[in-house]
Each structure stands twice: as C-alpha cells, then as structure tokens.
Image (tube, grey):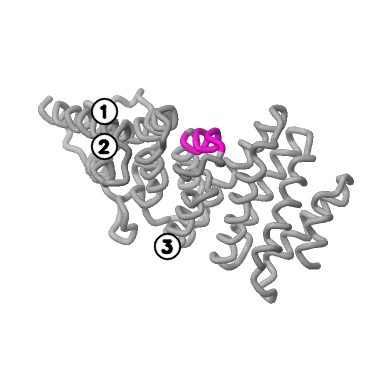
C-alpha cells in the first residue's frame, strides 16, 4: 500500500476502516525496504492522520490513538525517517490548527504533548545526537514552525502550550527511559527554540508565558538544595535538606548537562549558571528585540543576585 490510498483510508468515516488503516500505517512506516516517503506523499499521509484523529470522539479512544500515533516515531527504524514523520506532524498541526473547533482543541493539545514526549525519547535513544537535535529545533523555529517568532500565521496558542509542557515532558521521558543509563539531556541545545522565541517574539504576552512557565520553574528546580545529591554532602549540610520538600523535575535535574552529553551530567547549580549566561548572551545579540533584551537582562540579574545571596547565606 502506498501513502495516497492509506491517507484516504485514515480519513474514512468508518471507524473500522480507520482502525485497520492505523495498523497498516505502522507496518508501512517501519518497512525498511521502501524508499523514503516524498514530501507530497508525507503531506497527504499527515492530512489523513490529522482527520483520523479528528474523528476519534471518545476520551479513551482519543488517548489510545494519540499514544499510538506518537509511538510511531519510535517504531520507525531510521532516525532520519522518524524526523521526517515528525516534520510532517508539525507542518500539518500548524496548518490545520486554526480550523480546530473549541470542543476538539483539548484532544489536539494532548496529541502535541504525546509527540513532544516521544520526540525526547527518540532523541535520548540516539544519545542526543546533535544533528538530530538541531533538526528538531529547526522544525520548531522555521517559518511555519510552532515556535517561529516572526511568522504571524502561526497560532500563539501552540507556543503557549509548548512552553507549558516542554520541561514536564522532558522529565517524564527521562524518568521512563526504557534503556538506561540514558546520557544527560543537553538543556541548552533543547531549549534553543525557546531562547530564540523569547528573544524575538513581537508580543510581551508570549515572552511572559515562556519565562513564567518554562524558564522560572526550571531555574528554580536547578537552584534547589535537593538538586545536589544529599549522599555527597558533608553531614552538617546534609541535615539542611528538607525531606518534606518535593524536588521539582528530580530526574531531569539529576541527569542533565549544558550541551555535551558525552561529558557527563552537571550539578544543578552549575548548570543553572551556565543557562543564565546563555540567556544573557542571547539577550546581547543584535536580532533580539529591545523589549525582550531588557527582560532577559533583568532575569539574568535577578537570578544571579539570588544565587550570590544564597551563597553568602
């Protein structure tokens, strides 16, 4: 079966036909003997997948289908082919987003969440291969990408949703890795689309969402005393760690680095300083908007002063 008839079956009004088409889709995508799917065929395929999901109308069915579709990223044997499939997902999602009615919006938010999670697991499985990470970042930030700061056609609600879920899903992906030990997640690399979006977005609301829902919680987690392994601390300091305080993003904080996974993980407070320095550097770039520059400098200054005060205390 080729992509064109498969797309037609995926968008069928008959659920039985759609269910069979999903099974065929998995076999089709994981068939190594086939030539890579052309861009026109991938577009047709994703249009069929989009409307297959559109017509799933029961919560449990929606959840199962969202999981099955995202897992296809991991079932495809070639990382390059997986990323082509992922590229089709983002292109179709952005293109069709404005046509999603209010009653269906939540299930598409769920589908985005599942794909973000599966993307992290795919990248982790590839040992955070830099070219694969860069390709994912390019999908997000290019014209038509959900985190493109200059394309007015891209719905801002997608950028908001990605800001809300990005670190949560990275934490989940690391915590559920099936093939540990997974190399440390390169936070500077993975956060690059948000650094770019924060620096260049023309709207203050978007910047505020990225800082409040992504930068601040992550920086806070990295600054927590519990981001330090208590067993490695001297007894006097170990007593100050409050066992009743739940560490936010514990797996991520204990298994992250700046941009070089092969060099091993970095302790939370050190990684926080490196990320703040990266924010400062991006704020200093000529393409950064003046309004964002001021806010990023302020974030750097306030966070650095907090760190200095904590060290003095």
280 w.r.t. 190: above or below:
above
Mark 3–mark 2 contact, CB under 8 Å? no
Measure the C-alpha gap from mark 1 to mark 2. Answer: 7 Å
Mark 1 packing: few (<14 Cα in 10 Å), some, or many (20+)? some
Measure the C-alpha gap from mark 3 to mark 2. Answer: 31 Å
Mark 1–mark 2 contact, CB under 8 Å? yes
Q: Quadrant of the N terminus?
A: bottom right
Q: Earlier in the sequence, mark 1 or mark 2?
A: 2
Q: Which residue is mark 1?
A: 241
Measure the C-alpha gap from mark 3 to mark 1. Answer: 35 Å
Q: Secondary structure at mark 3?
A: loop
Q: Position of residue 102 (x, y in %)?
A: 69, 27
For the stretch drawn in magenta, the main secondary structure is helix
Q: Secondary structure at mark 1?
A: loop
Frontmost residue, 151 versus 183: 151
Mark 2 packing: few (<14 Cα in 10 Å), some, or many (20+)? some
127 w.r.t. 258: above or below:
below
Frontmost residue, 143 versus 76: 143
Q: Position of residue 141 (x, y in %)?
A: 46, 49
Task: Decide if residue 231 is in sight here.
Answer: no
Task: Decide if residue 123 is in sight here.
Answer: yes
Q: Earlier in the sequence, mark 3 or mark 2?
A: 3
101 w.r.t. 269: above or below:
above
């Amino acid at each position: 079966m080729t992509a064109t008839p498969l797309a037609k079956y995926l968008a069928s009004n008959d659920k039985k036909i759609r269910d069979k088409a999903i099974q065929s889709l998995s076999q089709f995508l994981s068939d190594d003997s086939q030539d890579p799917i052309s861009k026109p065929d991938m577009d047709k395929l994703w249009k069929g997948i989009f409307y297959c999901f559109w017509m799933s109308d029961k919560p449990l069915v929606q959840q199962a289908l969202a999981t099955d579709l995202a897992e296809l990223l991991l079932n495809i044997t070639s990382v390059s082919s997986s990323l082509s499939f992922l590229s089709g997902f983002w292109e179709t999602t952005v293109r069709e987003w404005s046509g999603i009615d209010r009653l269906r919006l939540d299930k598409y938010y769920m589908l985005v969440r599942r794909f973000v999670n599966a993307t992290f697991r795919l990248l982790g499985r590839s040992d955070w291969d830099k070219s694969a990470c860069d390709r994912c970042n390019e999908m997000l930030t290019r014209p038509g990408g959900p985190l493109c700061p200059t394309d007015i056609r891209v719905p801002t609600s997608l950028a908001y949703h990605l800001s809300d879920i990005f670190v949560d899903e990275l934490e989940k992906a690391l915590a559920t890795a099936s093939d540990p030990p997974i190399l440390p997640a390169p936070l500077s690399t993975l956060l690059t689309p948000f650094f770019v979006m924060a620096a260049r977005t023309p709207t203050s609301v978007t910047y505020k969402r990225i800082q409040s829902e992504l930068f601040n919680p992550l920086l806070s987690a990295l600054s927590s005393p519990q981001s330090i392994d208590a067993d490695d601390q001297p007894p006097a300091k170990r007593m100050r760690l409050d066992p009743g305080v739940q560490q936010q993003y514990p797996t991520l904080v204990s298994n992250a680095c700046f941009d070089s996974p092969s060099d091993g993980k970095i302790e939370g407070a050190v990684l926080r300083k490196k990320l703040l320095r990266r924010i400062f550097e991006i704020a200093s770039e000529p393409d950064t908007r003046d309004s964002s520059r001021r806010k990023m400098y302020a974030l750097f200054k306030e966070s650095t002063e907090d760190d200095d005060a904590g060290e003095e205390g």
